[in-house]
Amino acid sequence: MGKILFIAAIAFCLFADSRLNTREWYSHEVEFSDWRGIPPVDYSTNVPLSNWYSGHSAKYLRPENLKQFLSEPDTVMLGIDYYGFYKISCNVASGFQAQWIIDTLMHGGVLVTKSYKGKLFFQRKK
Amino acid sequence: MPQQGFRISDITSRYDPILREFFLKNGILFLSLITLIAGYLRFRGLGDNPLWVDEVGFGFLVQNGGNQEFIPKWFGQLFGLHTEFGLRFLPALCGTLTVPAIYFAVDKHKLGSALFVAVFPLFVFWSRLARPYAVAGLFLVLSWRYWWMMIPALMTTPIAVVGVRLNKWTLGLIALGIVFFFIRPDAFRGWSISLLQISSRWWYLPALTLVLYLTEWEKYFSSLRSHFASLRTQD
């Protein structure tokens, strides 16, 4: 009986391996976005990733940075990924093409947008 | 006439000696096959996915230096790795090598253990990421045979302590590691050789302190904060 259970466990493991997606956290709570080829951005919802792939140092787009973001005197570039679902970016993005935004972010995409005083001008999705 | 019941154990017990002999004779052949399967599962499309935030943290560690994940960090720096495949290469390689390592480390159920390590999804998952756990896993398995292998395991990640096979050496090192976190590294500078010789137990203390001091582990937590910006609330 033990041998049969072992064979079943190995078969289950191989089945699980075939479905393994390392872009999802294994608890399936987070989908990691594809920041490859991202242009330099000034604010980012995922600073380590945007810094790595753009080579440009960005600031966090998070609730605690909202004042700083809105008081920027010039147009700034934003990079928004899955973390954009957190309240700050959702508020900022309200009124825009919501389904397009959600589809992009849900599938691991990144939105790049220009912003002037909090007003967004979407440029591209990835 | 009594009914003859069918039991699986009748078959397995009949074939057990034959199968055992077959696996024993061809052990290395099967191990090679299992290692190939492990390698395929770990290296298949290794560089296809983009890095995620913790992997990028490791990338910055390789790029800029830091006082953690020493073995994979040194490997990355030695070969100038920065691509997705390059950063994930060592964990995938070590994850694959863990299969023959466990075959040689365990006394019983060698092929079964090797097959389990080769296909278990969590092992495969962590072997495919630019994180140190599969590297530490290889050293840990080797440390079951050679206790000093726990040193590179712990230098790869302190989390490796959970898998250490306990003996007088490893217990001593772990205890001293704990002591280190509560006592300043320079607390032992006043000690003389004669003091150290009074009790052999205390010999470990300055030795480990020296190792940890040289590797600058006292900066471990501050380096975590500097390399993982997500741990900060403000930039």
Image: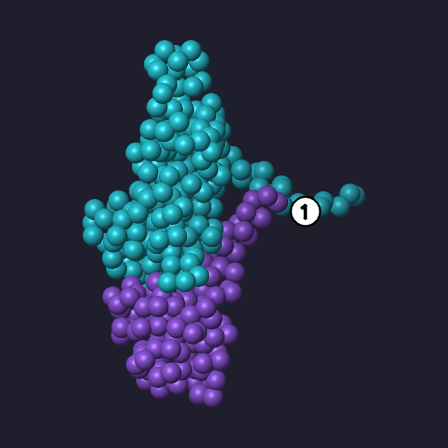
Chain colours: A purple, B cyan
User: From what the image shows, is residue A125 above or below residue B22?
Assistant: below
Q: Residue furthest left?
A: B79
User: From what the image shows, is residue B21 above or below residue B2?
Assistant: above
Percent across and percent down for residue B118 are 42, 48
From the viewer's perspective, tell me whether residue B4 is left or right of residue B204. right
Front-lying residue, B201 or B94: B201
Residue bearing mark 1: B6
Front-lying residue, B121 or A68: A68
In the rendered image, the quadrant that contains the N terminus of chain A is: top right
From the viewer's perspective, tell me whether residue B95 is left or right of residue B14. left
Identified by mark 1, the residue type is: Phe
Circle 1 chain: B
Percent across and percent down for residue A108 are 41, 72
Front-lying residue, B63 or B43: B63
Query: Residue at image x 40%, y 24%?
Result: B205
Query: Residue at image x 36%, y 66%?
Result: A47
How would you rate the neighbour count of disc 1 (Cα within 10 Å): few for under 14, some for 14-19, many for 20 or more? Answer: few
Query: Residue at image x 50%, y 51%?
Result: A10
Secondary structure under tag 1 reads loop
Percent across and percent down for residue B87 are 29, 54
User: From what the image shows, is residue B122 above or below residue A51?
Assistant: above
From the viewer's perspective, tell me whether residue B125 is left or right of residue B64. right
Q: Can you tell which quarter of the image residue B2 is in?
A: top right
Percent across and percent down for residue A87 are 50, 74
Query: Residue at image x 43%, y 74%?
Result: A67
Q: Can you tell which quarter of the image residue B208 is in?
A: top left
